[in-house]
């Protein structure tokens, strides 16, 4: 692995000052991070909180091994989906009883779109708006769910939503938008888009995959209707961790889960012939959750204990702002596609380069892990719980060298892997 480039003393000193200023939100010691690695991909797969392995070991050996089926009662397995939902709800601004942790984001989105088309009530309200540049699963799932439920999909960029609602707002049932764009890192205005949808009588489902755990979302405060998001990015639940779904309390009675499985029944152990949904958010459950993943996520969320999301947001903004400043100081003049305005920036920085794939691979070979996103983006995520301003300087210095040396064009860096 190439050694770390010489770091300019002024940047190192500034990093030290900023790390001291944001020390209250520093939980780096709570994570296992490989020596010498600068990990800027927590927006794809979050790092491992140290206590998770022991907790999973305990669940396997004691709760499963010894407790066996009794653990559904004795170890609180049955209620884990809503218990972890309540904990996660605190991070996204949802009062208890509105979030359940279950299934994947894709599956939860399917349930939400079908349910929302049913909630819209009028047969003339069948349009579902989706951002064509969303993470592809959102576009695929919205298309499939809307088709099955007799709706119609309008692919509308966030900037055009207001105009579209003026034109056909009274036919719109639901808007599905990401609060942070997975490619550019742009943060959309959840409050004003939600209000605009409500003005025409439509509902909104927010995809929080790239915002949960790093910024204040305020679902209840902004009267959001529905939301989904995953547990394995900034929430650090581990690969394939279960996702979450939020249904605002005022909508729960009308929320008819199309995957009406027994876990969402009012009396699951009544083994009744007919389905009757559970009275609250439990109705968004379908089948049995994978307990190892769910309890691993619960343990991972303990890292957030005592860390206000506002402090994390301040640290995150400082990290991304400082990283861009460091790129400038080191003479890296790639276009930064992530907004410079704090109010419009999530927790990542994406830069454009025609050989972005090779740049990312060359960085990884140097121990700086980010990822490549089509067609030409180097995407670097800044998980504020465990990254420091010093990491930002190290990453910027490696990027400067990768560009200066032309390493990105080496054949070993341009060969595509299955997962990018
Ligand atoms: C914005 C967004 N939505 C949805 C997903 C898909 O989630 P899942 O694979 O859990 O269905 C991802 C990431 O994979 C994502 O980034
Ligand atoms: N879910 C993933 C996976 O199973 C493998 C590799 C990456 C992912 C991701 O989550 C990608 C991520 N949603 C993104 O924003 O690109």
Image (spheres, rainbow, N blue to C red):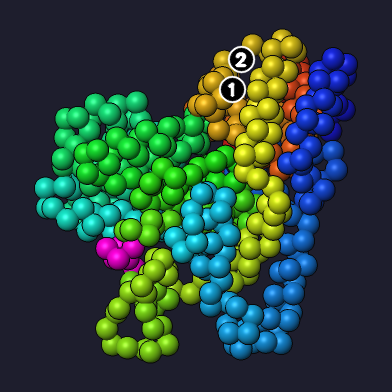
Q: Is residue 247 left or right of residue 121?
A: right
Q: Secondary structure at mark 2?
A: loop
Question: What's the magenta bit mostly, secondary-structure-wise?
Answer: loop
Disc nearer the start of the sequence (1/2) = 2
| Picture quadrant where residue 112 is located | bottom left
| 320 with respect to 368 (left or right) | left
Q: Which residue is mark 2?
A: 334
Task: Characterize the local packing of mark 1: few (<14), some (14-19) or many (20 or more) Cα atoms within 10 angstroms.
Answer: some
In which quadrant of the rendered view does residue 287 lie? bottom left
**Is residue 257 part of the magenta span, yes or no?**
yes
Which image quadrant is residue 394 in? top right
Labelled disc at residue 4:
none
Residue 305 point in image, percent of width and height: 69, 54
- Please name the residue shown 75% across and 64% down the image: 53
Q: Is residue 29 above or below residue 260?
A: above
Query: Circle 1 sits in a helix, a strand or a loop, which is it?
Result: strand
What segment carries the magenta color?
A: 252-259
* Residue 175 appears in the rendering: yes
Q: Residue at x 31, y 58 (%)?
A: 251
Image x and y of residue 158, in percent: 35, 30
- Measured along the vertical axis of the image, is residue 171 above or below residue 368? below
Residue under label 1 = 351
Please state, as top left, top right, bottom left or bottom right, where the N terminus lies in the image: top right
Q: Nearer the viewer, residue 388 or 103?
A: 388
Tell me, yes or no, whether the highlighted magenta stretch contains residue 309. no
The C terminus lies in which quarter of the figure?
top right
Residue 360 seen in the current view = no
> Is 344 on the left-hand or right-hand side of 222?
right
Tell me how far mark 1 sits from mark 2, CA to CA: 6 Å
At 59% across and 87% down in the image, what residue appears? 69
Q: Is mark 1 within 8 Å of ligand 2?
A: no
Pick the front one: 73 or 233: 73
């Amino acid at each position: 692995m190439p050694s770390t480039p010489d770091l300019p003393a002024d940047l190192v000193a500034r990093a030290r000052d900023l790390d001291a200023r944001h020390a209250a939100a520093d939980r780096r010691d709570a994570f296992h991070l490989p020596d010498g690695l600068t990990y800027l991909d927590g927006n794809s797969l979050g790092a491992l909180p140290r206590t998770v392995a022991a907790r999973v070991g305990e669940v396997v050996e004691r709760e499963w091994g010894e407790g066996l089926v009794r653990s559904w009662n004795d170890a609180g397995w049955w209620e884990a989906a809503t218990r972890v939902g309540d904990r996660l709800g605190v991070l996204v601004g949802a009062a208890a009883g509105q979030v359940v942790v279950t299934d994947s984001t894709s599956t939860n989105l399917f349930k939400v779109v079908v349910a929302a088309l049913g909630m819209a009530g009028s047969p003339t309200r069948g349009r579902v708006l989706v951002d064509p540049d969303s993470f592809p699963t959102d576009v695929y799932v919205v298309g499939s769910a809307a088709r099955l439920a007799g709706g119609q999909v309008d692919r509308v960029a966030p900037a055009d939503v207001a105009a579209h609602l003026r034109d056909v707002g009274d036919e719109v049932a639901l808007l599905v938008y990401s609060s942070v764009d997975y490619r550019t890192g742009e943060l959309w205005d959840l409050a004003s888009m939600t209000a605009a949808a409500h003005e025409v009588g439509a509902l909104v489902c927010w995809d929080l995959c790239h915002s949960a755990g790093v910024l204040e979302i305020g679902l209840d405060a902004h009267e959001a209707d529905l939301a989904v998001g995953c547990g394995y990015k900034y929430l650090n639940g581990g690969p394939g961790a279960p996702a979450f779904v939020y249904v605002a309390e005022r909508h729960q009675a009308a929320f008819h889960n199309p995957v009406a499985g027994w876990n969402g029944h009012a009396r699951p152990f009544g083994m009744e012939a007919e389905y009757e949904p559970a009275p609250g958010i439990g109705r968004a459950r379908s089948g049995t959750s994978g307990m190892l993943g769910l309890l691993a996520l619960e343990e991972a969320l303990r890292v957030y204990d005592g860390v206000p999301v506002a402090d994390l947001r301040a640290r995150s903004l400082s990290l991304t702002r400082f990283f861009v400043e460091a790129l400038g100081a080191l003479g890296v003049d790639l276009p930064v596609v992530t907004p410079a305005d704090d109010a419009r920036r999530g927790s990542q920085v994406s830069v454009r380069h025609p050989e972005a794939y090779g740049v990312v691979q060359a960085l990884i070979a140097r121990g700086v892990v980010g990822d490549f996103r089509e067609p030409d983006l180097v995407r670097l995520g800044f998980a504020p719980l465990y990254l420091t301003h010093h990491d930002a300087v190290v990453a910027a210095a490696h990027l400067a060298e990768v560009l200066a040396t032309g390493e990105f064009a080496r054949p070993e860096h341009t060969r595509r892997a299955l997962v990018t």
